């Protein structure tokens, strides 16, 4: 990954800081009591699910996304198995859900509202950066894949398919 790819990694923490941190500084009111506990529990569940999505997708790409060794971190093979059989951008879905979970854990209403901006920024990233990059990298194959899998899905069976594939590939 050269300097041109570094911004893709820096994009996410910057978006999260702007959408979660700045609202907290502007309005530092925090929930309390049972409402805080409920939001924290929901936030922990969402964050765990987001991390599982991200891990499963990353592991799948690592195991199947490289035709030649030493190709770097960016996949050079289109992966359409496991979690990618039912969703094109599972890692980005995980990165989209994470700020919502973190905002709920903190219990700051301003952060919870600001997490909506993080979701918008994540969706814009997929539409403006990732989709065109996939089209240029994988060509006609990606066009065919586009019609067979949505960009995102919240289906638990999709995550299960991804976890099963990762487990099976690790056993080999």
Image (spheres, rainbow, N blue to C red):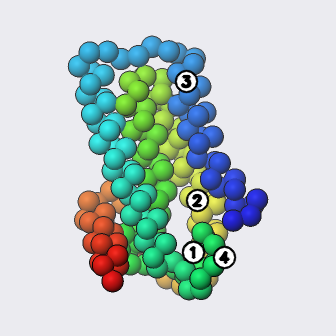
Q: Residues within 10 Å of mark 4 (few under 14, many from 20)?
A: few
Is residue 147 something that shows in the picture? no
- Which disc is residue 127 wearing? 2
Q: Give percent across and percent down for residue 167.
A: 30, 72
Question: Sequence-wise, which precedes: disc 1 or disc 2?
Answer: 1
- Which disc is residue 23 wearing? 3
What is the C-alpha distance between the residues marked 1 and 3?
36 Å
In the picture shown, does residue 41 fall above or below 160?
Answer: above
Q: Residue at x 38, y 78 (%)?
A: 81
Q: Give percent across and percent down for residue 83.
A: 37, 69
What is the C-alpha distance between the residues marked 1 and 2?
19 Å
What is the C-alpha distance between the residues marked 2 and 4?
14 Å
Question: Sequence-wise, which precedes: disc 3 or disc 4?
Answer: 3
Q: Residues within 10 Å of mark 1 (few under 14, many from 20)?
A: some
State yes or no: discs 2 and 3 in contact (Cβ < 8 Å). Answer: no
Q: Nearer the viewer, residue 172 or 90?
A: 172
**Mark in the foreground, 2 or 3:** 3
- Which disc is residue 136 wearing? 4
Question: Sequence-wise, which precedes: disc 1 or disc 3?
Answer: 3
What is the C-alpha distance between the residues marked 3 and 4?
37 Å
Q: Nearer the viewer, residue 33 or 19?
A: 33
Question: Sequence-wise, which precedes: disc 4 or disc 1?
Answer: 1
For residue 170, what is the image quadrant? bottom left
């Amino acid at each position: 990954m050269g300097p041109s790819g570094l911004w893709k990694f820096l994009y996410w923490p910057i978006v999260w800081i702007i959408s979660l941190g700045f609202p907290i500084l502007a309005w530092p009111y925090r929930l309390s009591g049972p409402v805080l506990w409920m939001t924290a529990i929901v936030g922990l569940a969402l964050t765990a699910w987001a991390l599982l999505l991200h891990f499963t997708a990353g592991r799948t790409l690592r195991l199947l996304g490289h035709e030649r060794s030493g190709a770097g971190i960016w996949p050079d093979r289109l992966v359409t198995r496991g979690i990618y059989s039912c969703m094109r951008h599972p890692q980005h879905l995980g990165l989209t859900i994470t700020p919502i979970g973190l905002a709920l854990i903190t219990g700051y209403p301003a952060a919870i509202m600001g997490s909506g901006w993080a979701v918008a920024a994540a969706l814009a990233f997929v539409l403006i950066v990732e989709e065109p990059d996939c089209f240029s990298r994988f060509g006609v194959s990606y066009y065919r894949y586009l019609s067979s899998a949505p960009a995102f899905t919240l289906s638990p069976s999709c995550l299960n398919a991804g976890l099963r594939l990762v487990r099976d590939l690790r056993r080999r």
